[in-house]
Image: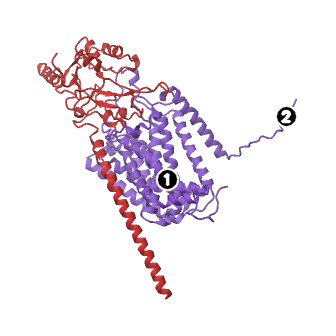
Chain colours: A purple, B red
Amino acid sequence: MKLNLTIQPRFRLNFSPLVWVLLILMGIAFVTAMIRYIFGIGAISDLSYSYPWGFWISFDLFTGVVISSGGFLMAGSVYILGIKEFQPLLRPSVLTAFLGYIMVAIALLVDLGHPERIWYMMIHWNGTSVLLEIGICVMSYLTVLAIEFAPVAFEGFKLQKWAHLIHKYIMPFVILGVVLSTLHQSSLGSLLLIQPAKLHPLWWTPVLPIMFFTSAISVGLAMIILESSLSSRYFQRGLETHLLEKLAKAIPVVLAIYLVLKFGELAFAGDLHYLFTSGGFSILFWAEILIGAVAPIIWFSVRGNRKSANGLLAGAIILLLGMILNRFNVSWFAVRHPDPMFYMPAFMSNVHYMPTLPEISVSLGIFAAGILAFGLAAKYLPVFEEEHDPKAPSFGD
Amino acid sequence: MTEIKHHAYLFDATRCIDCRACMVACSVENNIEMDKTRIWVAGVGIKGEYPELQRGTMVYHCMHCDHPDCMSACPVGAYTKAEDGPVTYNPDLCIGCRYCMNACPFGVPHFDYDKGIIEGAFIDKCTFCPQRIYNGQEPACVQTCPTDALEYGDREELIARAHARIADHPGRYIDHVYGEKENGGTSYLIISHIPFGELGLPNLPATPVNEVSEKVMEITIPFALGWGAILTGVAAGVNLYNKKKEKTAVEEKAEKSK
């Protein structure tokens, strides 16, 4: 017996393997998130009374926000400082920031105990709370990014009039966007100011917001390099090496300021003795400083590295790894919780935290969705085109 | 009972016999599951060598700080500090962000990790038994304590009582009332014969831990306005400069073509 299998399916999904992987990751994340909504956060994560925040906050919020800082850097450079030559980098960075912030918002909806009440932040204000500032900034900046990105979408849908209208009144939104970004990047540092008793003194300082803002600038520059390099490889388009070189030149300057601030503050606070005496904390500290700041300064000071596509990409990856380690350190690894006490009730004794696979899968799925959305936008919208250029070539495979 | 201006507890670690009746009383009074108690007893175990043995237990619940860090941290203002002491939590406002748990240096607020969004996952913590104290009764844990390790009264009075007891028994206590100054003052006062650090209490300065973050929040809005003004100025200046440059370029071109 033979089954008749000759009927042609009406739809045939012709996705590349990468797209399939991304879709599967998204599916897993969706199922995991549903389990979390039905059975509670404890059903999928290792979060506990001692560790109310874990991988989601370190990766989705802290890392997600800092890698989205390229958007305001480019918008500020092009519109406010009038450096028009950076125009080709503007749209991809705004898109990265827009998607990055959407990813942050979605991830926070999984992490929040009452995601359906997120809008309470708009009406119930507690002025002393840094988290309120962050919530307001995320919501407002998402709106601003949507407005900044709207011309691209309108052009993609052949609504030139609308695109032109928004473009005409873009200035106030750009300024608002830079102000919101400054507040938001730095307020993630302020978020930890309330933990002087919990965060290790190598990281806790009253100038945490300034440290966060400075490092966010370096990460934003590195992210623009990374995202231009990767999309030039994936979409087979030219790489603006001469522009990226200028960004790479600025990185050592920013990082030098960062290092001076960091060690200056430690010396000022009298915490220098912790540098070598805190065991694992010292190792984490030196790892983030050497990988995230010292190595990129040296790497980008070499002219050859700034001139070559591979050199730019490698330097950006080194910097990003180090700075992401910094965000993990400051929000998770260096946060000390009280030691478990002898016959502490069982529910209080969990002072160890190890993210579970489902927890990580949620973040991975959201990240996959972001990459897919970037790919779709790059393919169907004029992201990599000069503004108002009808003869621009179309990209894609 | 004398009039109470500022409700407070006093805990004497030398009197606690680790019977945990307070835990049962609290759960019964407030109708909460036993494994989600708002009060918990922890011990340091047996210390020293025979015959010089010592053991210590500590009863934890909300410290009801004078400058509560949970209240400072909560974005939606779900916490309130009453003039007369108690720090209370309002589940109707809570968005479940768990920032209060991060902020509290004592690790007091607890979260329902085992509840989904249909049941509703909330924070839970000691309420100071308002249904009892405002009707002239002691909180449930104090009422039930068989050895008077937990006492309840006016804060000033309890501080005086604690100091008097330390003075009356030289050598028995460490000469310090934990909570008198710590974290800007708390309404849960502790005296002990073993170091407070060993009881699991953090070593905190007299300034509340939320001090720096509240100061930063105060300057945020002026900073944002100032920064916005600077950026507007820069943008306008650059725009003007570019226009001027364009104009001169055009004029030069025109002159050249003459």
Residue A25 shows in the view: yes
In depth, the one of A200 and A94 nearer the eye is A94
In depth, the one of B53 and A215 nearer the eye is A215
Instruction: Tell me where residue A20 appears, x and y as whole percent.
Output: 65, 42
Q: Which label number is shown at residue A4?
A: 2
Instruction: Tell me where residue A262 appears, x and y as whole percent.
Output: 33, 51
Measure how far apart labels 1 and 2 are at the Cα level.
53 Å
Instruction: Tell me where residue B232 appears, x and y as whole percent.
Output: 37, 60
Crowd band around label 2 with a 10 angstrom C-alpha radius: few (<14), some (14–19), many (20+)? few
In this picture, residue B230 sits left or right of residue B146: right
Q: Residue lying furthest bottom in this view?
A: B258
* Residue placed under numbered mark 1 in the picture: A147
Crowd band around label 1 with a 10 angstrom C-alpha radius: few (<14), some (14–19), many (20+)? some
Residue A304 shows in the view: no
Query: Circle 2 — which element?
Result: loop
> Label 2 lies in what chain?
A
